[in-house]
Image (spheres, rainbow, N blue to C red):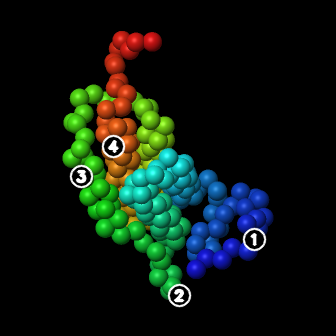
Amino acid sequence: MVQLTRIYTGGGDKGKTSLGSGQRVSKNAARICAIGSVDESNALLGIVRLYTKDSKEVDRSLARLQNDLFDLGADLCLPEDPKDFPPLRLRKDQADFLEKQMDEMNQSLEPLTSFILPGGHPVSAYLHHARTVVRRAERDVCALREEEGEAAVSPPIVRYLNRLSDYLFVLARFLNDRGNSDVLWVPGGKAES
């Protein structure tokens, strides 16, 4: 169990931070940028949950996703396997859960006939915002993998982030009155003002 007795340490005052191994790295290192985007995604899901308290099933799923994102951050924070304790690694079944949830929600959604704009109900707009931040996290993780090599990122991470952004898109539609309140894209400047 984690026990934090003090939040500020002063250790980052010179632009460095520590990975789980204790290794000091720049706060703008690719790994730290990826962890930051994952953290921002998690914070946005916290905002979304302010709107889903009345839907126990949706809120329970979002709570699981927030915990999964912490697992993902822990995985990124400790790239090497330490000898004294096993690291937390993201698992394949965490992305499988997202696929199962999407399949269930999609059964009650009409097929898309247009691209949709973020909007409709506030919870859906926040889900679209979270989706875009998850896409950034995915790009950051891919950049990290290209910079440090395939072994720098455990395999389930990119798949999970890819599925999570899809899940958030489907959930946004589902919570937008099952797509009936989606805001459709009208191309070519023909939208009514």
**Mark 1 or 2: the one toward you:** 1
**Mark 4 or 2: the one toward you:** 4
- Distance (Cα) linking label 2 and label 3: 41 Å
Residue 153, given in percent of the width and then of the height, sits at 42, 64
Residue 161, given in percent of the width and then of the height, sits at 39, 54
- Distance (Cα) linking label 4 and label 2: 45 Å
Marking on residue 144: none
Residue 176, given in percent of the width and then of the height, sits at 37, 38
Q: Which residue is mark 3?
A: 103
Q: Amino acid at mark 4?
A: Phe
Q: Earlier in the sequence, mark 2 or mark 3?
A: 2
Q: Earlier in the sequence, mark 1 or mark 2?
A: 1
Q: Amino acid at mark 2?
A: Asp
- Distance (Cα) linking label 1 and label 2: 25 Å
- In this orientation, does residue 37 appear? no
**Mark 4 or 1: the one toward you:** 4
Label 3 Cα crowd, 10 Å radius (few <14 / some 14-19 / many 20+): few
Discs 1, 2 touching: Cβ within 8 Å: no
Q: Which residue is mark 4?
A: 174
Q: Earlier in the sequence, mark 4 or mark 1?
A: 1
Q: Which residue is mark 1?
A: 6
Label 2 Cα crowd, 10 Å radius (few <14 / some 14-19 / many 20+): few
- Rendered residue at 75%/70% (across/down): 6
Q: Which residue is mark 2?
A: 84
Q: Secondary structure at mark 3?
A: helix
